[in-house]
Amino acid sequence: MKTMKKLICLGMVALMLLSAAACARAEKPVEPGTQQTDGQQPADDKKPDGDKDMGNEDKSKYRVGSQVSDAYVDPSTIDTVPEDQIKAKGYEYDYDSLTYELVWSDEFDYEGRPDDTKWDYDTGASGWGNHELQYYTRGDNAEVKDGLLTITARKEKKEGAEYTSTRLISKGKGDWLYGKFEIRAKLPYGKGTWPAIWMLSTDWNYGGWPNSGEIDIMEHVGYDQDVVHYSIHTLSYYHSIGTQKTATSKVKGASEDFHVYGLEWLPDKMIFTVDGEKTFTYEPTKYKSTPTWKEWPFDKRFHLLLNIAVGGDWGGQRGVDEDIWPQTMEVDYVRVYQSPEITAITQ
């Protein structure tokens, strides 16, 4: 019995010694550039990929087990954006205290064609980058009467196109940097209609589309009745690569009633509205901590466009109903306001 007790005691002492040795090995920190596998250290040319090109940085603090954490960023690989290239940051203003003054408007309180001191036209049947089917005429499809501007899309042939319509532009006659825009309109309906109230760069300072930006205050495709879209397009965010920043809302009676489609364009954000209710806000710093012109080309002047497209990559996605024409977009007014407070901090 004494011999058995002695053997048990010796066994327990051996186990305690083995446990202490194992703990000592576990507590020994893994040296940078090594991987703990079966007690073997890899040769210098077989270091884990995560350890390459990290200089003299103490990388042990970035380890998760035997790997370098993804949280590690090599400072030499970071592209520093020069301060003068950062956009939509550094503006200080009290949003709730902003005031606005009317600086441009068309109330359509006259008759005939749209006021040529305020409006011009894009014309032709080029497909307009979206394989659209209409020919845009110079005023033949736009009329002002009874206090309304009416843009009419018709099924009629013109210079190879099967439809005609109008694309009104304020370029050179109404161009603005920042402001509040309100357009009260009633939209067309039916498959194949694609009305839009939108803005483009006047001077294309950052290059061709989408570099210099696009602002879609209202878009509607007839196959998806009463769903209104609000979007921005830039070099980083545009529909052709599926990155555009956009939102939709249900606007009941969009083709039966007038609604006010609005944009408040500030030096660091854009706020879209319908009948005064916010529907979408684009704030580039929510997507990138240091935006450049690629995310915010909206520090240059833009102009307004009003049009009805027919068919095209989006408007004609579910075909074109040949029995619904003519179709009209009626506009009650276009009003542009600017804030003295914003003008003061951006000049």
Image (cartoon, grey):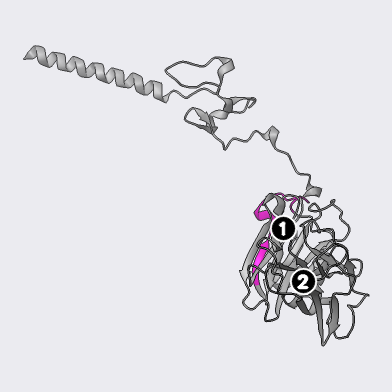
Neighbourhood count class around disc 1 (C-alpha, 10 Å): few under 14, some 14–19, many 20 upward: some
- The answer to whether residue 323 is seen in the rendering is yes
Q: Position of residue 230 (x, y in %)?
A: 69, 65
Residue occupying the far top of the picture = 3
The C terminus: image quadrant: bottom right
Secondary structure state at the residue bearing disc 1: helix
Above-or-below relation of 337 to 295? below
Real-space CA distance between mark 1 and mark 2, rounded to the nearest whole angstrom: 30 Å
Q: Position of residue 223 (x, y in %)?
A: 64, 67
Examine the image and state in which quarter residue 272 appears: bottom right
Q: For this rendering, which residue is in front, 43 or 205? A: 205
Magenta range: 278-295
| Nearest to viewer (mark 1 / mark 2) | 1
The amino acid at mark 2 is Lys
Residue occupying the far bottom of the picture = 146
Q: Is residue 279 left or right of residue 98?
A: left
The answer to if 226 sits in the magenta stretch is no
The amino acid at mark 1 is Asp
Neighbourhood count class around disc 2 (C-alpha, 10 Å): few under 14, some 14–19, many 20 upward: many
The answer to if 280 sits in the magenta stretch is yes
Residue with the mark numbered 1: 313
Residue with the mark numbered 2: 180
> How many numbered marks appear?
2
Secondary structure state at the residue bearing disc 2: strand
Q: Position of residue 116 (x, y in %)?
A: 93, 75
Q: For this rendering, which residue is in front, 225 or 335? A: 225
Q: Position of residue 34 (x, y in %)?
A: 52, 21
